[in-house]
Image (cartoon, coloured by chain):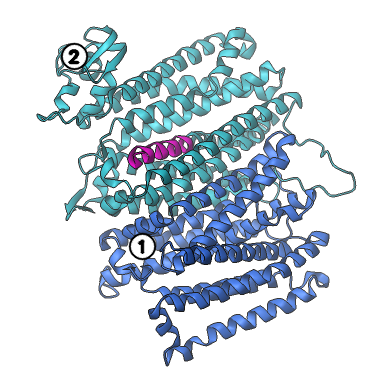
Chain colours: A blue, B cyan
Amino acid sequence: MMNLFGDPAIWLPFAFAVLMGISILVYVVLDGFDLGVGLLFPFAEADERDRMVASIGPFWDANETWLVMAIGILLVAFPVAHGTILTALYLPVAVMLIGLILRGVAFEFRVKAPTRHRSAWNRAFFAGSLMASLSQGFMLGLYVTGLVITPATIAFGILTALFLTVGYSFIGASWIIAKAEGPLQRKAVGWARGGIWGVLFGIAAISMATPLVSGRIWDKWFSFPSILYLSPLPILSGVLLYLLWRVLQRLPLPGDRWAWAPFTIGTGLFMMAFGGLAYSFYPYVVPERMTIYEAASAPESLIIILVGALIVLPIIAAYSILAYTVFRGKATQLTYY
Amino acid sequence: MDPLILSRIQFAANISFHILFPTITIALGWVLLFFKLRFNRTGDEKWMDAYRFWVKVFALSFALGVVSGITMSFQFGTNWPGFMEVVGNVAGPLLAYEIMTAFFLEAAFLGIMLFGFRRVPGWLHTTATALVAFGTTLSAFWILVLNSWMHTPAGFELRDGVVHATDWFAIIFNPSMPYRLVHMLLASGLTVAFLIAGLSALRWIWGDRGAEVRATLRFGAIMGAVLIPMQILAGDFHGLNTLEHQPAKVAAMEGNWETQSRVPLVLFAIPDEEARENRFEVAIPGMASLILKHDFDGVVPGLNDFVTEGGVVEHPPVAPVFFAFRVMVGLGLAMLALSWSALWFMRRKRGIEGLPNVYIYAFAGMAFSGWVATLAGWYVTEIGRQPWLVTGVLTTAESVADVSGGMVLSTLLAYLAVYALLTAAYLGALTYLARKASHGGRTTPDPAPRDAGIEIMTPAE
């Protein structure tokens, strides 16, 4: 089996890079809307907050597991890169972790702790979501500028931190559009309109910065003929953005038509942006320093994981679909009985 | 300050905080399944009331376990990059299997288990509860395989200083794995048994005389009484296994400096590593030899065997291991005494009213004894492995990250503040839930305290 697709030292790291990329993308979209809902908390009324939490309550834990999956693959498949990347990002990682801790426990405490503490846990829910979003955006900025700390890269990181946070609030708003009705849904349409620029500027900033930082990436995109067959990517992104803008102008529509459109189109945009990033950085896992082939674990360990992944991933997909089916439709009261 | 010691304190703080919550959820998942099945079988509402109360504790503990666990998967990289660089080929697949087989299973079915009671058929809700319980146990299995392998590595070879797996069966079923797994699963069961009995006793003290609280206090006392003798036996076997594979750890646990026969069982002492002797020792002659070798004349290795000619100490720090071991054993004996004598008072359907008042307070006081014993046990085994991170393969000092002490100190303080806050909030929420349940009688939904006319969307409390 190991030599089925040629040299295992080549195709195995590639397969794991693909798996890791998919996990990061799934995480960014799924936990993106969870974090986005948290970011929008201060703009909502008390009863709306309960409904917003109800719209993500059954899912957030599984959504966050994709982060564990992504970091797990980095850890197990590219152990050397894992150390290099995470020590370089030491402080933002700590901020993100504390944010994720606050966000995750505030979910539970805001309804289980004494009622007089509820507003404090609501604030913790917002603060945790904000810390996690900002630090993830900051890490994205540092990563694309090559994981070196200079005033310029920090400034760029702050910029991407803001854009990703607004982008998350956008995808969170589009999730609420799909899962809510009435005044909350109308409010969410307004939030989504306000958040769309984060997506736009975020994609633009990173698209412009990456080729400028690295001559290699510049050549990959702007040499002939790659520029030709890569051109659909920015064009399609532009079309999606335009569509999104038009849809948000008209929502909500009678019969709740198109309610899923903003989330679907938003997901499409995130996929485009991520695809572009993946194309830019391949084959590097630590930008310009270490390729996936140099960082990979021994093939005999990777194959053990891959066999398991091929068996388990379809099962994970099946029961994730089950969970989303059980809790489909508009978010309603969440009760334990 | 020294980044090594700061990183160690930080990881110890993280993992100590983390283990509190899986210790509860591993066994509580199965207990919830038991409550649900009892309800399915008898139709008695008290079992469903018990399910509803304890599923809240489960949800809260689960959330804390998840978020504190994520922290550790990152800290392997931020603080201990040497670990994965050297043993990644073994640790990687084990962690990957934990994520793929256990984490997603728990996470996906947790939603259905918590919020699906009205949305899915009864059998699917029961199945979801069973799958979540199975998932938490499976997760414990994989992580204990990896932890045991770090204590007693097997099935690998070193090539250019990097561990390569040669025999996965030997890696998974490494010498200490079965003992450690059983010991930890029983510890989880005992923690939950005394937590259930303790919170039920607290509700009794606050005036709750419902059928639910009677059932759960009795349930906790019986569960504790059944598990504690098994745990003492499992602990004994685990100790013998450690003596075989990590004799220096056992020597530190016993406070035994010289290799000798007729080793006394030290009940109390203050081990002095400078003088290499015990001060204020109270001991029973020959008992340690009897326990460890099942023979008074058995020869047990002492700490002085693990100091090189040049005076380099290769055994773990003695005092923390020595004291933590006594805390664990002492709590185990207290659990044995309390649960068995309580059962004697509750015999022949006398139930909770047969218990002297002091027992009710003792159960309430022992509510979190399982936590303390579990932490003490982990300190014994983890500090007892020092100076090694992976016995004989990699030392802790070799794997620490090259980050500055100031940076580690700042994150350490931040983590400690968050953990202190959350521990207080968790204990507060549990007592609040118990108080609310004992005043409201049952834990069925409160009438929503909001304006009438608005449809209330209360997330599950």
Query: Residue placed at 58% from the left, 18% from the top?
Result: B364
Secondary structure mainly formed by the magenta segment: helix
| B116 is within the stretch colored magenta | no
- Counting labels gives 2
Label 2: which residue? B295
Q: Amino acid at mark 2?
A: Asp
Query: Residue placed at 36% from the left, 62% from the top?
Result: A306
The label shown at residue A306 is 1
In the rendered view, would you say A233 is above or below B143? below
Along the line of sight, which residue is nearer the eye, B108 or B301?
A: B301
Where residue A13 appears, x then y in whole percent? 33, 67
Where residue B36 appears, x then y in whole percent? 61, 36
| B17 is within the stretch colored magenta | yes
Query: Residue placed at 39% from the left, 54% from the top?
Result: A87
Q: Which residues are magenta?
A: B1-19
Disc 2 chain ID: B
Residue B348 in sight from this viewpoint: no
Locate the C terminus of chain A and report the quarter of the image it occupies. top right
Q: CA distance from mark 1 to mark 2?
A: 50 Å
Query: Residue placed at 61% from the left, 61% from the top?
Result: A165
Along the line of sight, which residue is nearer the eye, B101 or B283?
A: B283
Badge 2 marks a residue whose secondary structure is loop
Disc 1 chain ID: A
